[in-house]
Image (cartoon, rainbow, N blue to C red):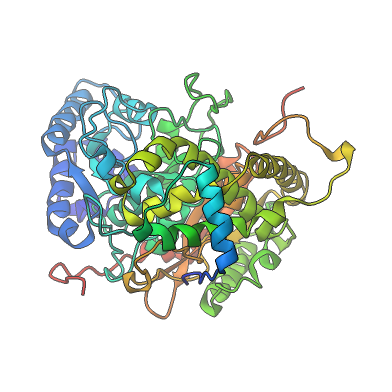
Amino acid sequence: MSTLGPLHELSIAEAGRALRSGQVTSRNLTEAALARIDALDPMFNAFVLITRERAIVEAERADASFASGVDAGPLQGVPYALKDIYATAGVRTTCHSNLLRDNVPENDCAVQEKLAAGGGVLLGKVGTFEFAIGGPSFDLPFPPARNPWNPDHFTGGSSSGSAAAVASGMLRMAMGSDTGGSIRGPAALCGVVGLKPTYGRVSRRGVFPLAYSLDHCGPLTWSVEDTALTMQVIAGYDSQDPASVDVPVPDFKAALGRNLDGVRIGYTRKFFIDNPFLTAESLKALDAAAEQMAALGAAVDEVDISSYELFDACAQVIMFAEAFAIHEADLKTRPYAYGRYGYQRLVSGAVLSAADLVQAQRLRRELTAALNDGALYTHDALLAPSGLATAAPFSDFGKDAARWGGMLTNPFNVTGSPALALPIGFGANGLPLGAQIVGRPFDEPLVLRIGAAYEAAAGVSLRRPRIVETAQPS
Amino acid sequence: MIAQDRHSSSDEADIERRFLNAGVVVPADRAEGAYAAAVRLLATLHWLRTPRTAAAEPSHIFAPGKKRS
């Protein structure tokens, strides 16, 4: 065992090799992860429920499968967690809200079905913003997750517990969801990898919606390879998700390890250069990432895409209109069942008109066509910021809901494009900075190839937070 | 990094009317933040209303890629 080093530092691929060679058991991995959760979660509040006994049973089942020659794939025996909007049969699923604090679903969501069939070990449910939108709130059933790089700072949201759990090494993979950046934002602010797959690539069946036509399910992991391995298990057509697309599932790992010769990457510098939230250190890191990709063989040049204001208007109107429709009855009849931030944000959708929504949908189609027929026609992928700054401290958030302006992620929810967030450096305060690689629809393999090549060359992902286990947030 | 929101009393009257039209009564102790969120949202609407020609009107809704022929 000692030759493996700390078990929490094993990548999913390394853990898989160790499991298959008998160097480690799933029970070993699971117990180590549970011990790390016990030690660290009081600081970071990543988990809202730990399924300890179930995890041990699942780990022993995975070990028995290995012993009998059954191999269900790359996640067999590997611990993971689910954002608490993913329905889990017999396991409480709260959406981090008092409204659903006693909700125990009868059925698993599609992703959990796939992860279970793949032999994964569910460690529990991780926190979110209320209904994946509220904010880092202190008036909910569970406290907000804290950033492992500095627990006085928030994680971004809404896949906040997923990012905190992965960044702190409690586990290697946690599922998140992304309606306007809720995978890529926390990934950027916590220094981990997060993939928003193409709209329709991963089933949302059984995942509580924020906005039907913008929601995506995807993983947060330590490395691009871990993301690729997870995608191999969770991707695929689901006839019960109306947005699911029946396209072949590629080998997501096949192109990893290749350089970027022949890859055309458009750097969307004009898209964000005038954004008031852009910090000099973010711009420097993004420019350096573009140079690094060029050094790896890619043809990198600047490219124009539609203005952020157009994308943002489209995303905001569709998201809040759809979200209000989902929550309308409860918002009207029991407003105090929601936390303050969640209520204030969700109810704002009530002020929109039917015409506003149609205008947004019309613009959405135009923006999507412009991107796919423009920058993503002349280029194979785009480089853009995922965050424009490092994570804000909790003290920046007031008593009322506000918009944190540091993200530029929702354009690719509008277009449904695959987008991979990955760390590209650190601010002067020691907190991570992030970029995203955006691809053509269903071209996750190229997005992952670019991410993996950059990751290996830049080495940013190898740097992990130095966690002082006795530290407490102020 | 927190966006600052300012709005006028005329904004508030318009927003109150919109909430009432939707059948929503915002509790007084949550009104400030709810109204600010509504102001932020309404401020985006002008971006949606660019002039279009008849030929530019799409006849179908969003799809992430091109449909197979």
Which residue is depicted at the point 65% across and 64% down? A294
* Left or right of residue A49, residue B10 in this image: right
Residue A137 on image: x %, y %: 30, 58
Whether residue A404 is visible, yes or no, is: yes
Q: Is residue A1 above or below residue A269?
A: above
- Quadrant of the frame with the C terminus of chain A: bottom left
Whether residue A253 is visible, yes or no, is: no
Which residue is depicted at the point 59% across and 64% down? B10
Q: Is residue A295 above or below residue A52?
A: below
Residue A108, quarter of picture: top left
Which residue is depicted at the point 57% across and 23% down? A246
Residue A288 on image: x %, y %: 58, 71
Q: Is residue A66 above or below residue A40?
A: above
Which residue is depicted at the point 56% across and 49% down? B18
Q: Nearer the viewer, residue A260 or A82?
A: A82
Residue A389 on image: x %, y %: 48, 71
Q: Nearer the viewer, residue B14 or A163?
A: B14
* Total labels drawn: 0
Residue A21, quarter of picture: top left
Q: Nearer the viewer, residue A384 or A254?
A: A384
Residue A274 on image: x %, y %: 66, 73
* Left or right of residue A290, residue A202 in this image: left
